[in-house]
Amino acid sequence: MRIKYYMLQALLLFSFSPLMAQPGKAASPAKPKLVVGLVIDQMRWDYLYRFQSLYGTGGFNRLLKQGFSCENTFIPYVPTYTAVGHSTVYTGSVPAYHGIVGNYWFDKSINGSMYCTSDSTVTGLGNNGWAGKMSPKNLWVSTITDELRLSTNFESKVIGIALKDRGAILPAGHSANAAYWYDEGKWISSSFYMKALPAWVNDFNAKDLAGKYMSQDWNTLLPLEKYSQSTADDQPYELALPGETSPTFPHRLSTNGKTKYEAFKYTPFAASFTFDFARQAMEEENLGKGKATDFLAVSISSTDYTGHSFGPNSIEVEDSYLRLDKDVADFLTYLDKNLGKDNYLVFLTADHGATHVPGFLAEHRIPGGVYSNAALTTEINNSINDLFGFKKAVLSVQNYQVYLDLAGMEKNKIDIEAMKKQVIKILSAKPFITTVYETAKTGEATLPQPYKERAINGYTASRSGDIQFVLKSGYFDGGLKGTTHGLWNPYDAHIPLLWYGWGVKQGQTNRETYMTDISATLAGMLKIQMPSGCVGHVVTELIK
């Protein structure tokens, strides 16, 4: 009986292997030639379906109908910011382990703010200033791209590309061949990766494609009446593009002067520009043409700039996704022709979502609003000074946390516990805050699920603040125009996750999955080690 049992186990394992040929079908290759990671910055899950009737057949709809969709994928930590999201996708880890707790955090060792990819020890290539002094050194663990390189004794090539430095650097990992990001119309890098920019990158930059894209105005792709999922144009709570005075169509990009390369980031043409460079990188670096599997990590950053300015219900956002759909379709067609449909594996996800603009919510009697971190800082500092005679108790308020000068208070013999209670009292009185607690005592705090688990996952003692506050739904730090993200709520934390290509069967799951599962699943499919801090699980339903 035991022999029969083991024979049955072996038969089942072999039958469900992604390498097993089906009757009448050719066997899939043992490994894909290329893995492509597409992270769409600020893409809410509902954009897949909200605009679906206007999408073509070759982009998002191709991925949905021919690929596999994880319909209930969530971000398992707070705060939900860009750097944290990209780090988590590619490490399968959470901030408590990978160390990227925000785009910025207050670093008490330098008594100042630390940017997630800042590295003063490297030199910029293409930019000698701050924009080029970047590397992944603040990331504490390995990425799936690192593990791919390790698994092939570094024969696999890995390249990261994004307008934002953090969107290129953190996915590419520590051992990447290259990471490229945008600066004033050009693609730049740093000496962390190479001694000089490759000739092909300089040649690409010399074409000034960003300038050429900006020579055309941004009109809607379709007639305005087709945008039935959006609020009417010209809303008082929308922000104008840099160099413009009105947030309305048509956007006169061709007349933009000194700010054109900055304004470019807010347009859908910047996504096309990113794919242009990705294709060029594939050609010049022969990605997918070697013996080992290569990895191209592409992040589309323009959608985040557009979303922050205009909000999820704007015509600008809808138009951007209709155009992005065409870009994705074109890129998939390029992969078909360049590598073959069965030779590449694609996943598409997002680093976070976004809330609606509070002004829009107010029009429809939905809760939401804004507050000011700067005002909170001033109020707390004034109160602590009055009560304890200590002038600057708050070093920073960011990531929904208060960083306190505990060392200074101890030196001046301030009653730290009494001071913390006063800070908590001030914050607890705010109508937009639901809960306040000490971050070091998160495990003891009376917090509801799923927030508590996300708060624990997002905390690391050396980089997180001392006091955490939880906002009501729809609230954020900012002004009355535009929007942002960063909370645990579904509008920020429910993201798309689509799989397509090699080893992927058609279908979907409504089981709850997490951003951390992406790298775990890739590791399982590629039969390589999970990243060193990975806490995710393989999404077994998608594997052929």
Image (cartoon, rainbow, N blue to C red):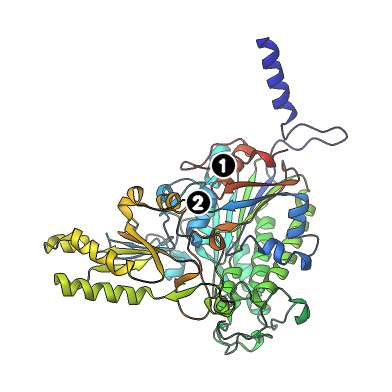
Q: Residue 81 placed where, x, y %?
A: 49, 62
Residue in view at x 65 percent, y 11 percent: 2
Residue displayed at 59% across by 75% down:
266
Quadrant of the rendered image containing residue 217:
bottom right
Is residue 360 shown left or right of residue 473?
Answer: right
Q: Can residue 452 be seen in this view?
A: yes
Q: In this view, does 395 lie to the left or right of 519?
A: left
The front one of 229 and 367 is 367
Return the disc, 1 or 2, that comes first in the chain's sequence.
Answer: 2
Q: Position of residue 88 (x, y in %)?
A: 51, 51
Q: Quadrant of residue 163?
A: bottom right
x, y percentage for residue 393?
A: 23, 68
The x, y position of residue 136, in whole percent, is 45, 55
Front one among 139 and 540 = 540
Q: Residue furthest left?
A: 413
Helix, strand or loop under label 2: loop
Seen in the picture, residue 314 relative to 493 is either above or below; the reply is below
Q: Can residue 194 be seen in this view?
A: no
| Depth order, front residue of 155/486 | 486
Per the image, the residue denoted by label 2 is: 76
- Amino acid tagged 1: Ala
Dot 1 crowding, Cα within 10 Å, few <14, some 14–19, many 20+: many
- Label 1 to label 2: alpha-carbon separation: 15 Å
User: What amino acid type is highlighted by mark number 2?
Assistant: Pro
Q: Quadrant of the N terminus?
A: top right
The disc label shown at residue 520, or none: 1
- Residue 198 higher or lower than 68, as above or below: below
| Residue extending furthest toward the right | 24
Question: Which residue is found at the position 61% from the left and 35% from the top?
Answer: 527
